[in-house]
Image (tube, rainbow, N blue to C red):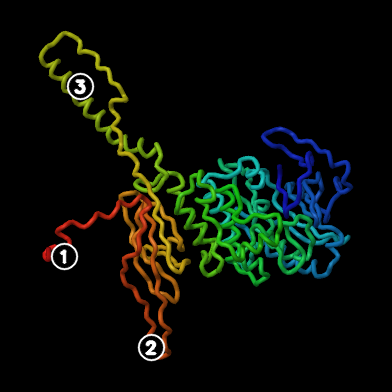
Amino acid sequence: MFLLAWGFTAHRGAVVGSTRGQSMTVELAQYDPLVGTTVADRYVIQSRIGSGGMGAVYRAMQTGLDRDVALKLLKEEVSWDPDTITRFHREAKAMSLLVHPNTVRVFDFGQTPEGTLYLAMELLEGEIVTKRLEREGALSAGETIRVGAQILASLHEAHSKSIVHRDLKPDNIYLANVQGHAQPVVKILDFGIAKVFEGENRFDQLETQAGTVFGTPRYMSPEQAQGKPLDARSDLYSVGVLLYQLVTGVAPFRDEDAVVVMAKHIREKPISPMRAAPTRRIPPSLDRALMKALEKQPEKRWQDAEAFRAALEACLVDAEGRHSHTGIFWRTQQVTRERWPWLLGGLVALLLVVGLSSFWLGRGGATEAAPEVVIDPDSLFVEAAAAPEIGEAQLDSDPAGAEVYDGERYLGTTPLRWELPMTERLDVEVRREGFTTELATLVPGESRRVLLERLRPVDDDDEPRVVRRPVRPRTTSMTEESPTPAPTKADDPYTRFR
């Protein structure tokens, strides 16, 4: 299928073109009076791709350049509204400034003499992410990271030009088949359109509704759900929701009622991806990156698209199982790579022995042929050490909701679950504003609880202070505790009186 923009629905058989060399048929051409006409004296409409509540998208040929484009024509009732016309030109001009390869290109925009607003965009072949999810359910962690990195690269350019998308969702992420690329290239659709048409009524309950709150509730940031002013960090929250769904197969908050979904974005903390999809291979590093993107308060999220993208790319090593000593993604390739030095050393030693034997036999004038040496390749492999056993450490605090840090590395908030090799321990700091900072140790297979003491109010004349003191947290082993031995006679303090 070709590019469908602004959430329009494709009509079966309505796409014209070639996919893998096979021609596609047209069923709607004879029903659409615009097919065969010329728009703005330069776009010859060839077929209708899709339609929606605001208009329709057509495949068209731009005369003079002989370039195929996706041409969007707005409905007549929308095109004649003065406020809509002003917003359309402002936003369309901003969109035309976006040139990043992961953003759908806008070539031209304007209004015909008849008053119809139009946008000419690049025509793409591929599919929207929604279709991919319907077919496969979810993506691998590695593919999720690659898709997310491309989305964030596009947003980095848009945010630098003060453009906030405000409606990021699977329908607006396109996987394009681009010549010269072995893998689909991500293209973001619909920049600024939700803002332009904030008063347009949509019929899907989970789509944009009329009023001050607009967007798609399933992917809204908390501030967007409350109708507050938005900045780039709202988009980053939406990306977090989108990637959460890609890697787990489900959105963090789901309900048939759009208002309920919005309320959950505002109040509820989502279940971590690893817990939402325990059977899928989701590395802890990716889990933490997504949970940070889903923080309720914008100042606690990733502060810009570039920082979020760097964090995702750092997770790729874990996601593809290339970590050498820890984590749950220990794969056969690691063992194979560890075998190669032993294999190479064995081959060198074997060739040396054979060479020396041939030399001494030849020197001694032996006439008999040297016996054939049969090498069993399997005998040259040396098994690598088994992957370390991984355990889960649990840490809670009273009160809950404290931030846990390994040095300056943020691990999450309590209650916290953290995976470690069974032989390792991790010393962390438990911090919460208004309370003492306590030290704790994460131990695989154990659940620990730290008591935080409230700091006394600080007078204006006092120096602010933060108390950091090591404590011995109350520990509850996840394994059965052994009974306490009875005191021996030697331990009895009254023995000397008997």
Quadrant of residue 234 in the image? bottom right
Image quarter of residue 471? bottom left
Callout count = 3
In the picture of the structure, the residue carrying the numbered disc 3 is 354
Work out whether residue 60 can be spotted: no
Task: Check disc 2 and give the amino acid type.
Answer: Asp
300 vs 383: above or below: below
From the viewer's perspective, is residue 124 above or below residue 80? above
Q: Which residue is drawn at 35% across and 44% down?
A: 389
Residue matched to label 1: 494
Amino acid at the residue labelled 3: Val
- Picture quarter with the C terminus: bottom left
Which label's residue is closer to the chain start, 2 or 1?
Answer: 2
Q: Residue 448: percent from the left, percent from the top? A: 38, 60
Q: Mark 2 points at which residue?
A: 462
Local packing at callout 1 (Cα closer than 10 Å; few below 14, some 14-19, many 20+) is: few
Residue with the most extreme top position: 367
* Mark 3 and mark 2 residues within 8 Å of each other at the beta carbon: no
How far is the residue under mark 1 from the one under mark 3?
A: 81 Å
Q: Is mark 3 on a helix, strand or loop?
A: helix
Tell me the residue at 42%/65% (across/down): 397
Q: Are the residues at dot 1 and dot 3 in contact (C-beta closer than 8 Å)?
A: no
Secondary-structure class at tag 2: loop
Q: Is mark 1 on a helix, strand or loop?
A: loop
Rate crowding at label 3 as few (under 14), some (14 to 19) or many (20 or more) other CA atoms within 10 Å.
Answer: few
Q: Locate residue 464, reporting x and y percent.
A: 39, 83
Mark toward the start of the polypeptide (1 vs 3): 3
- Which of marks 2 and 3 precedes in the sequence? 3
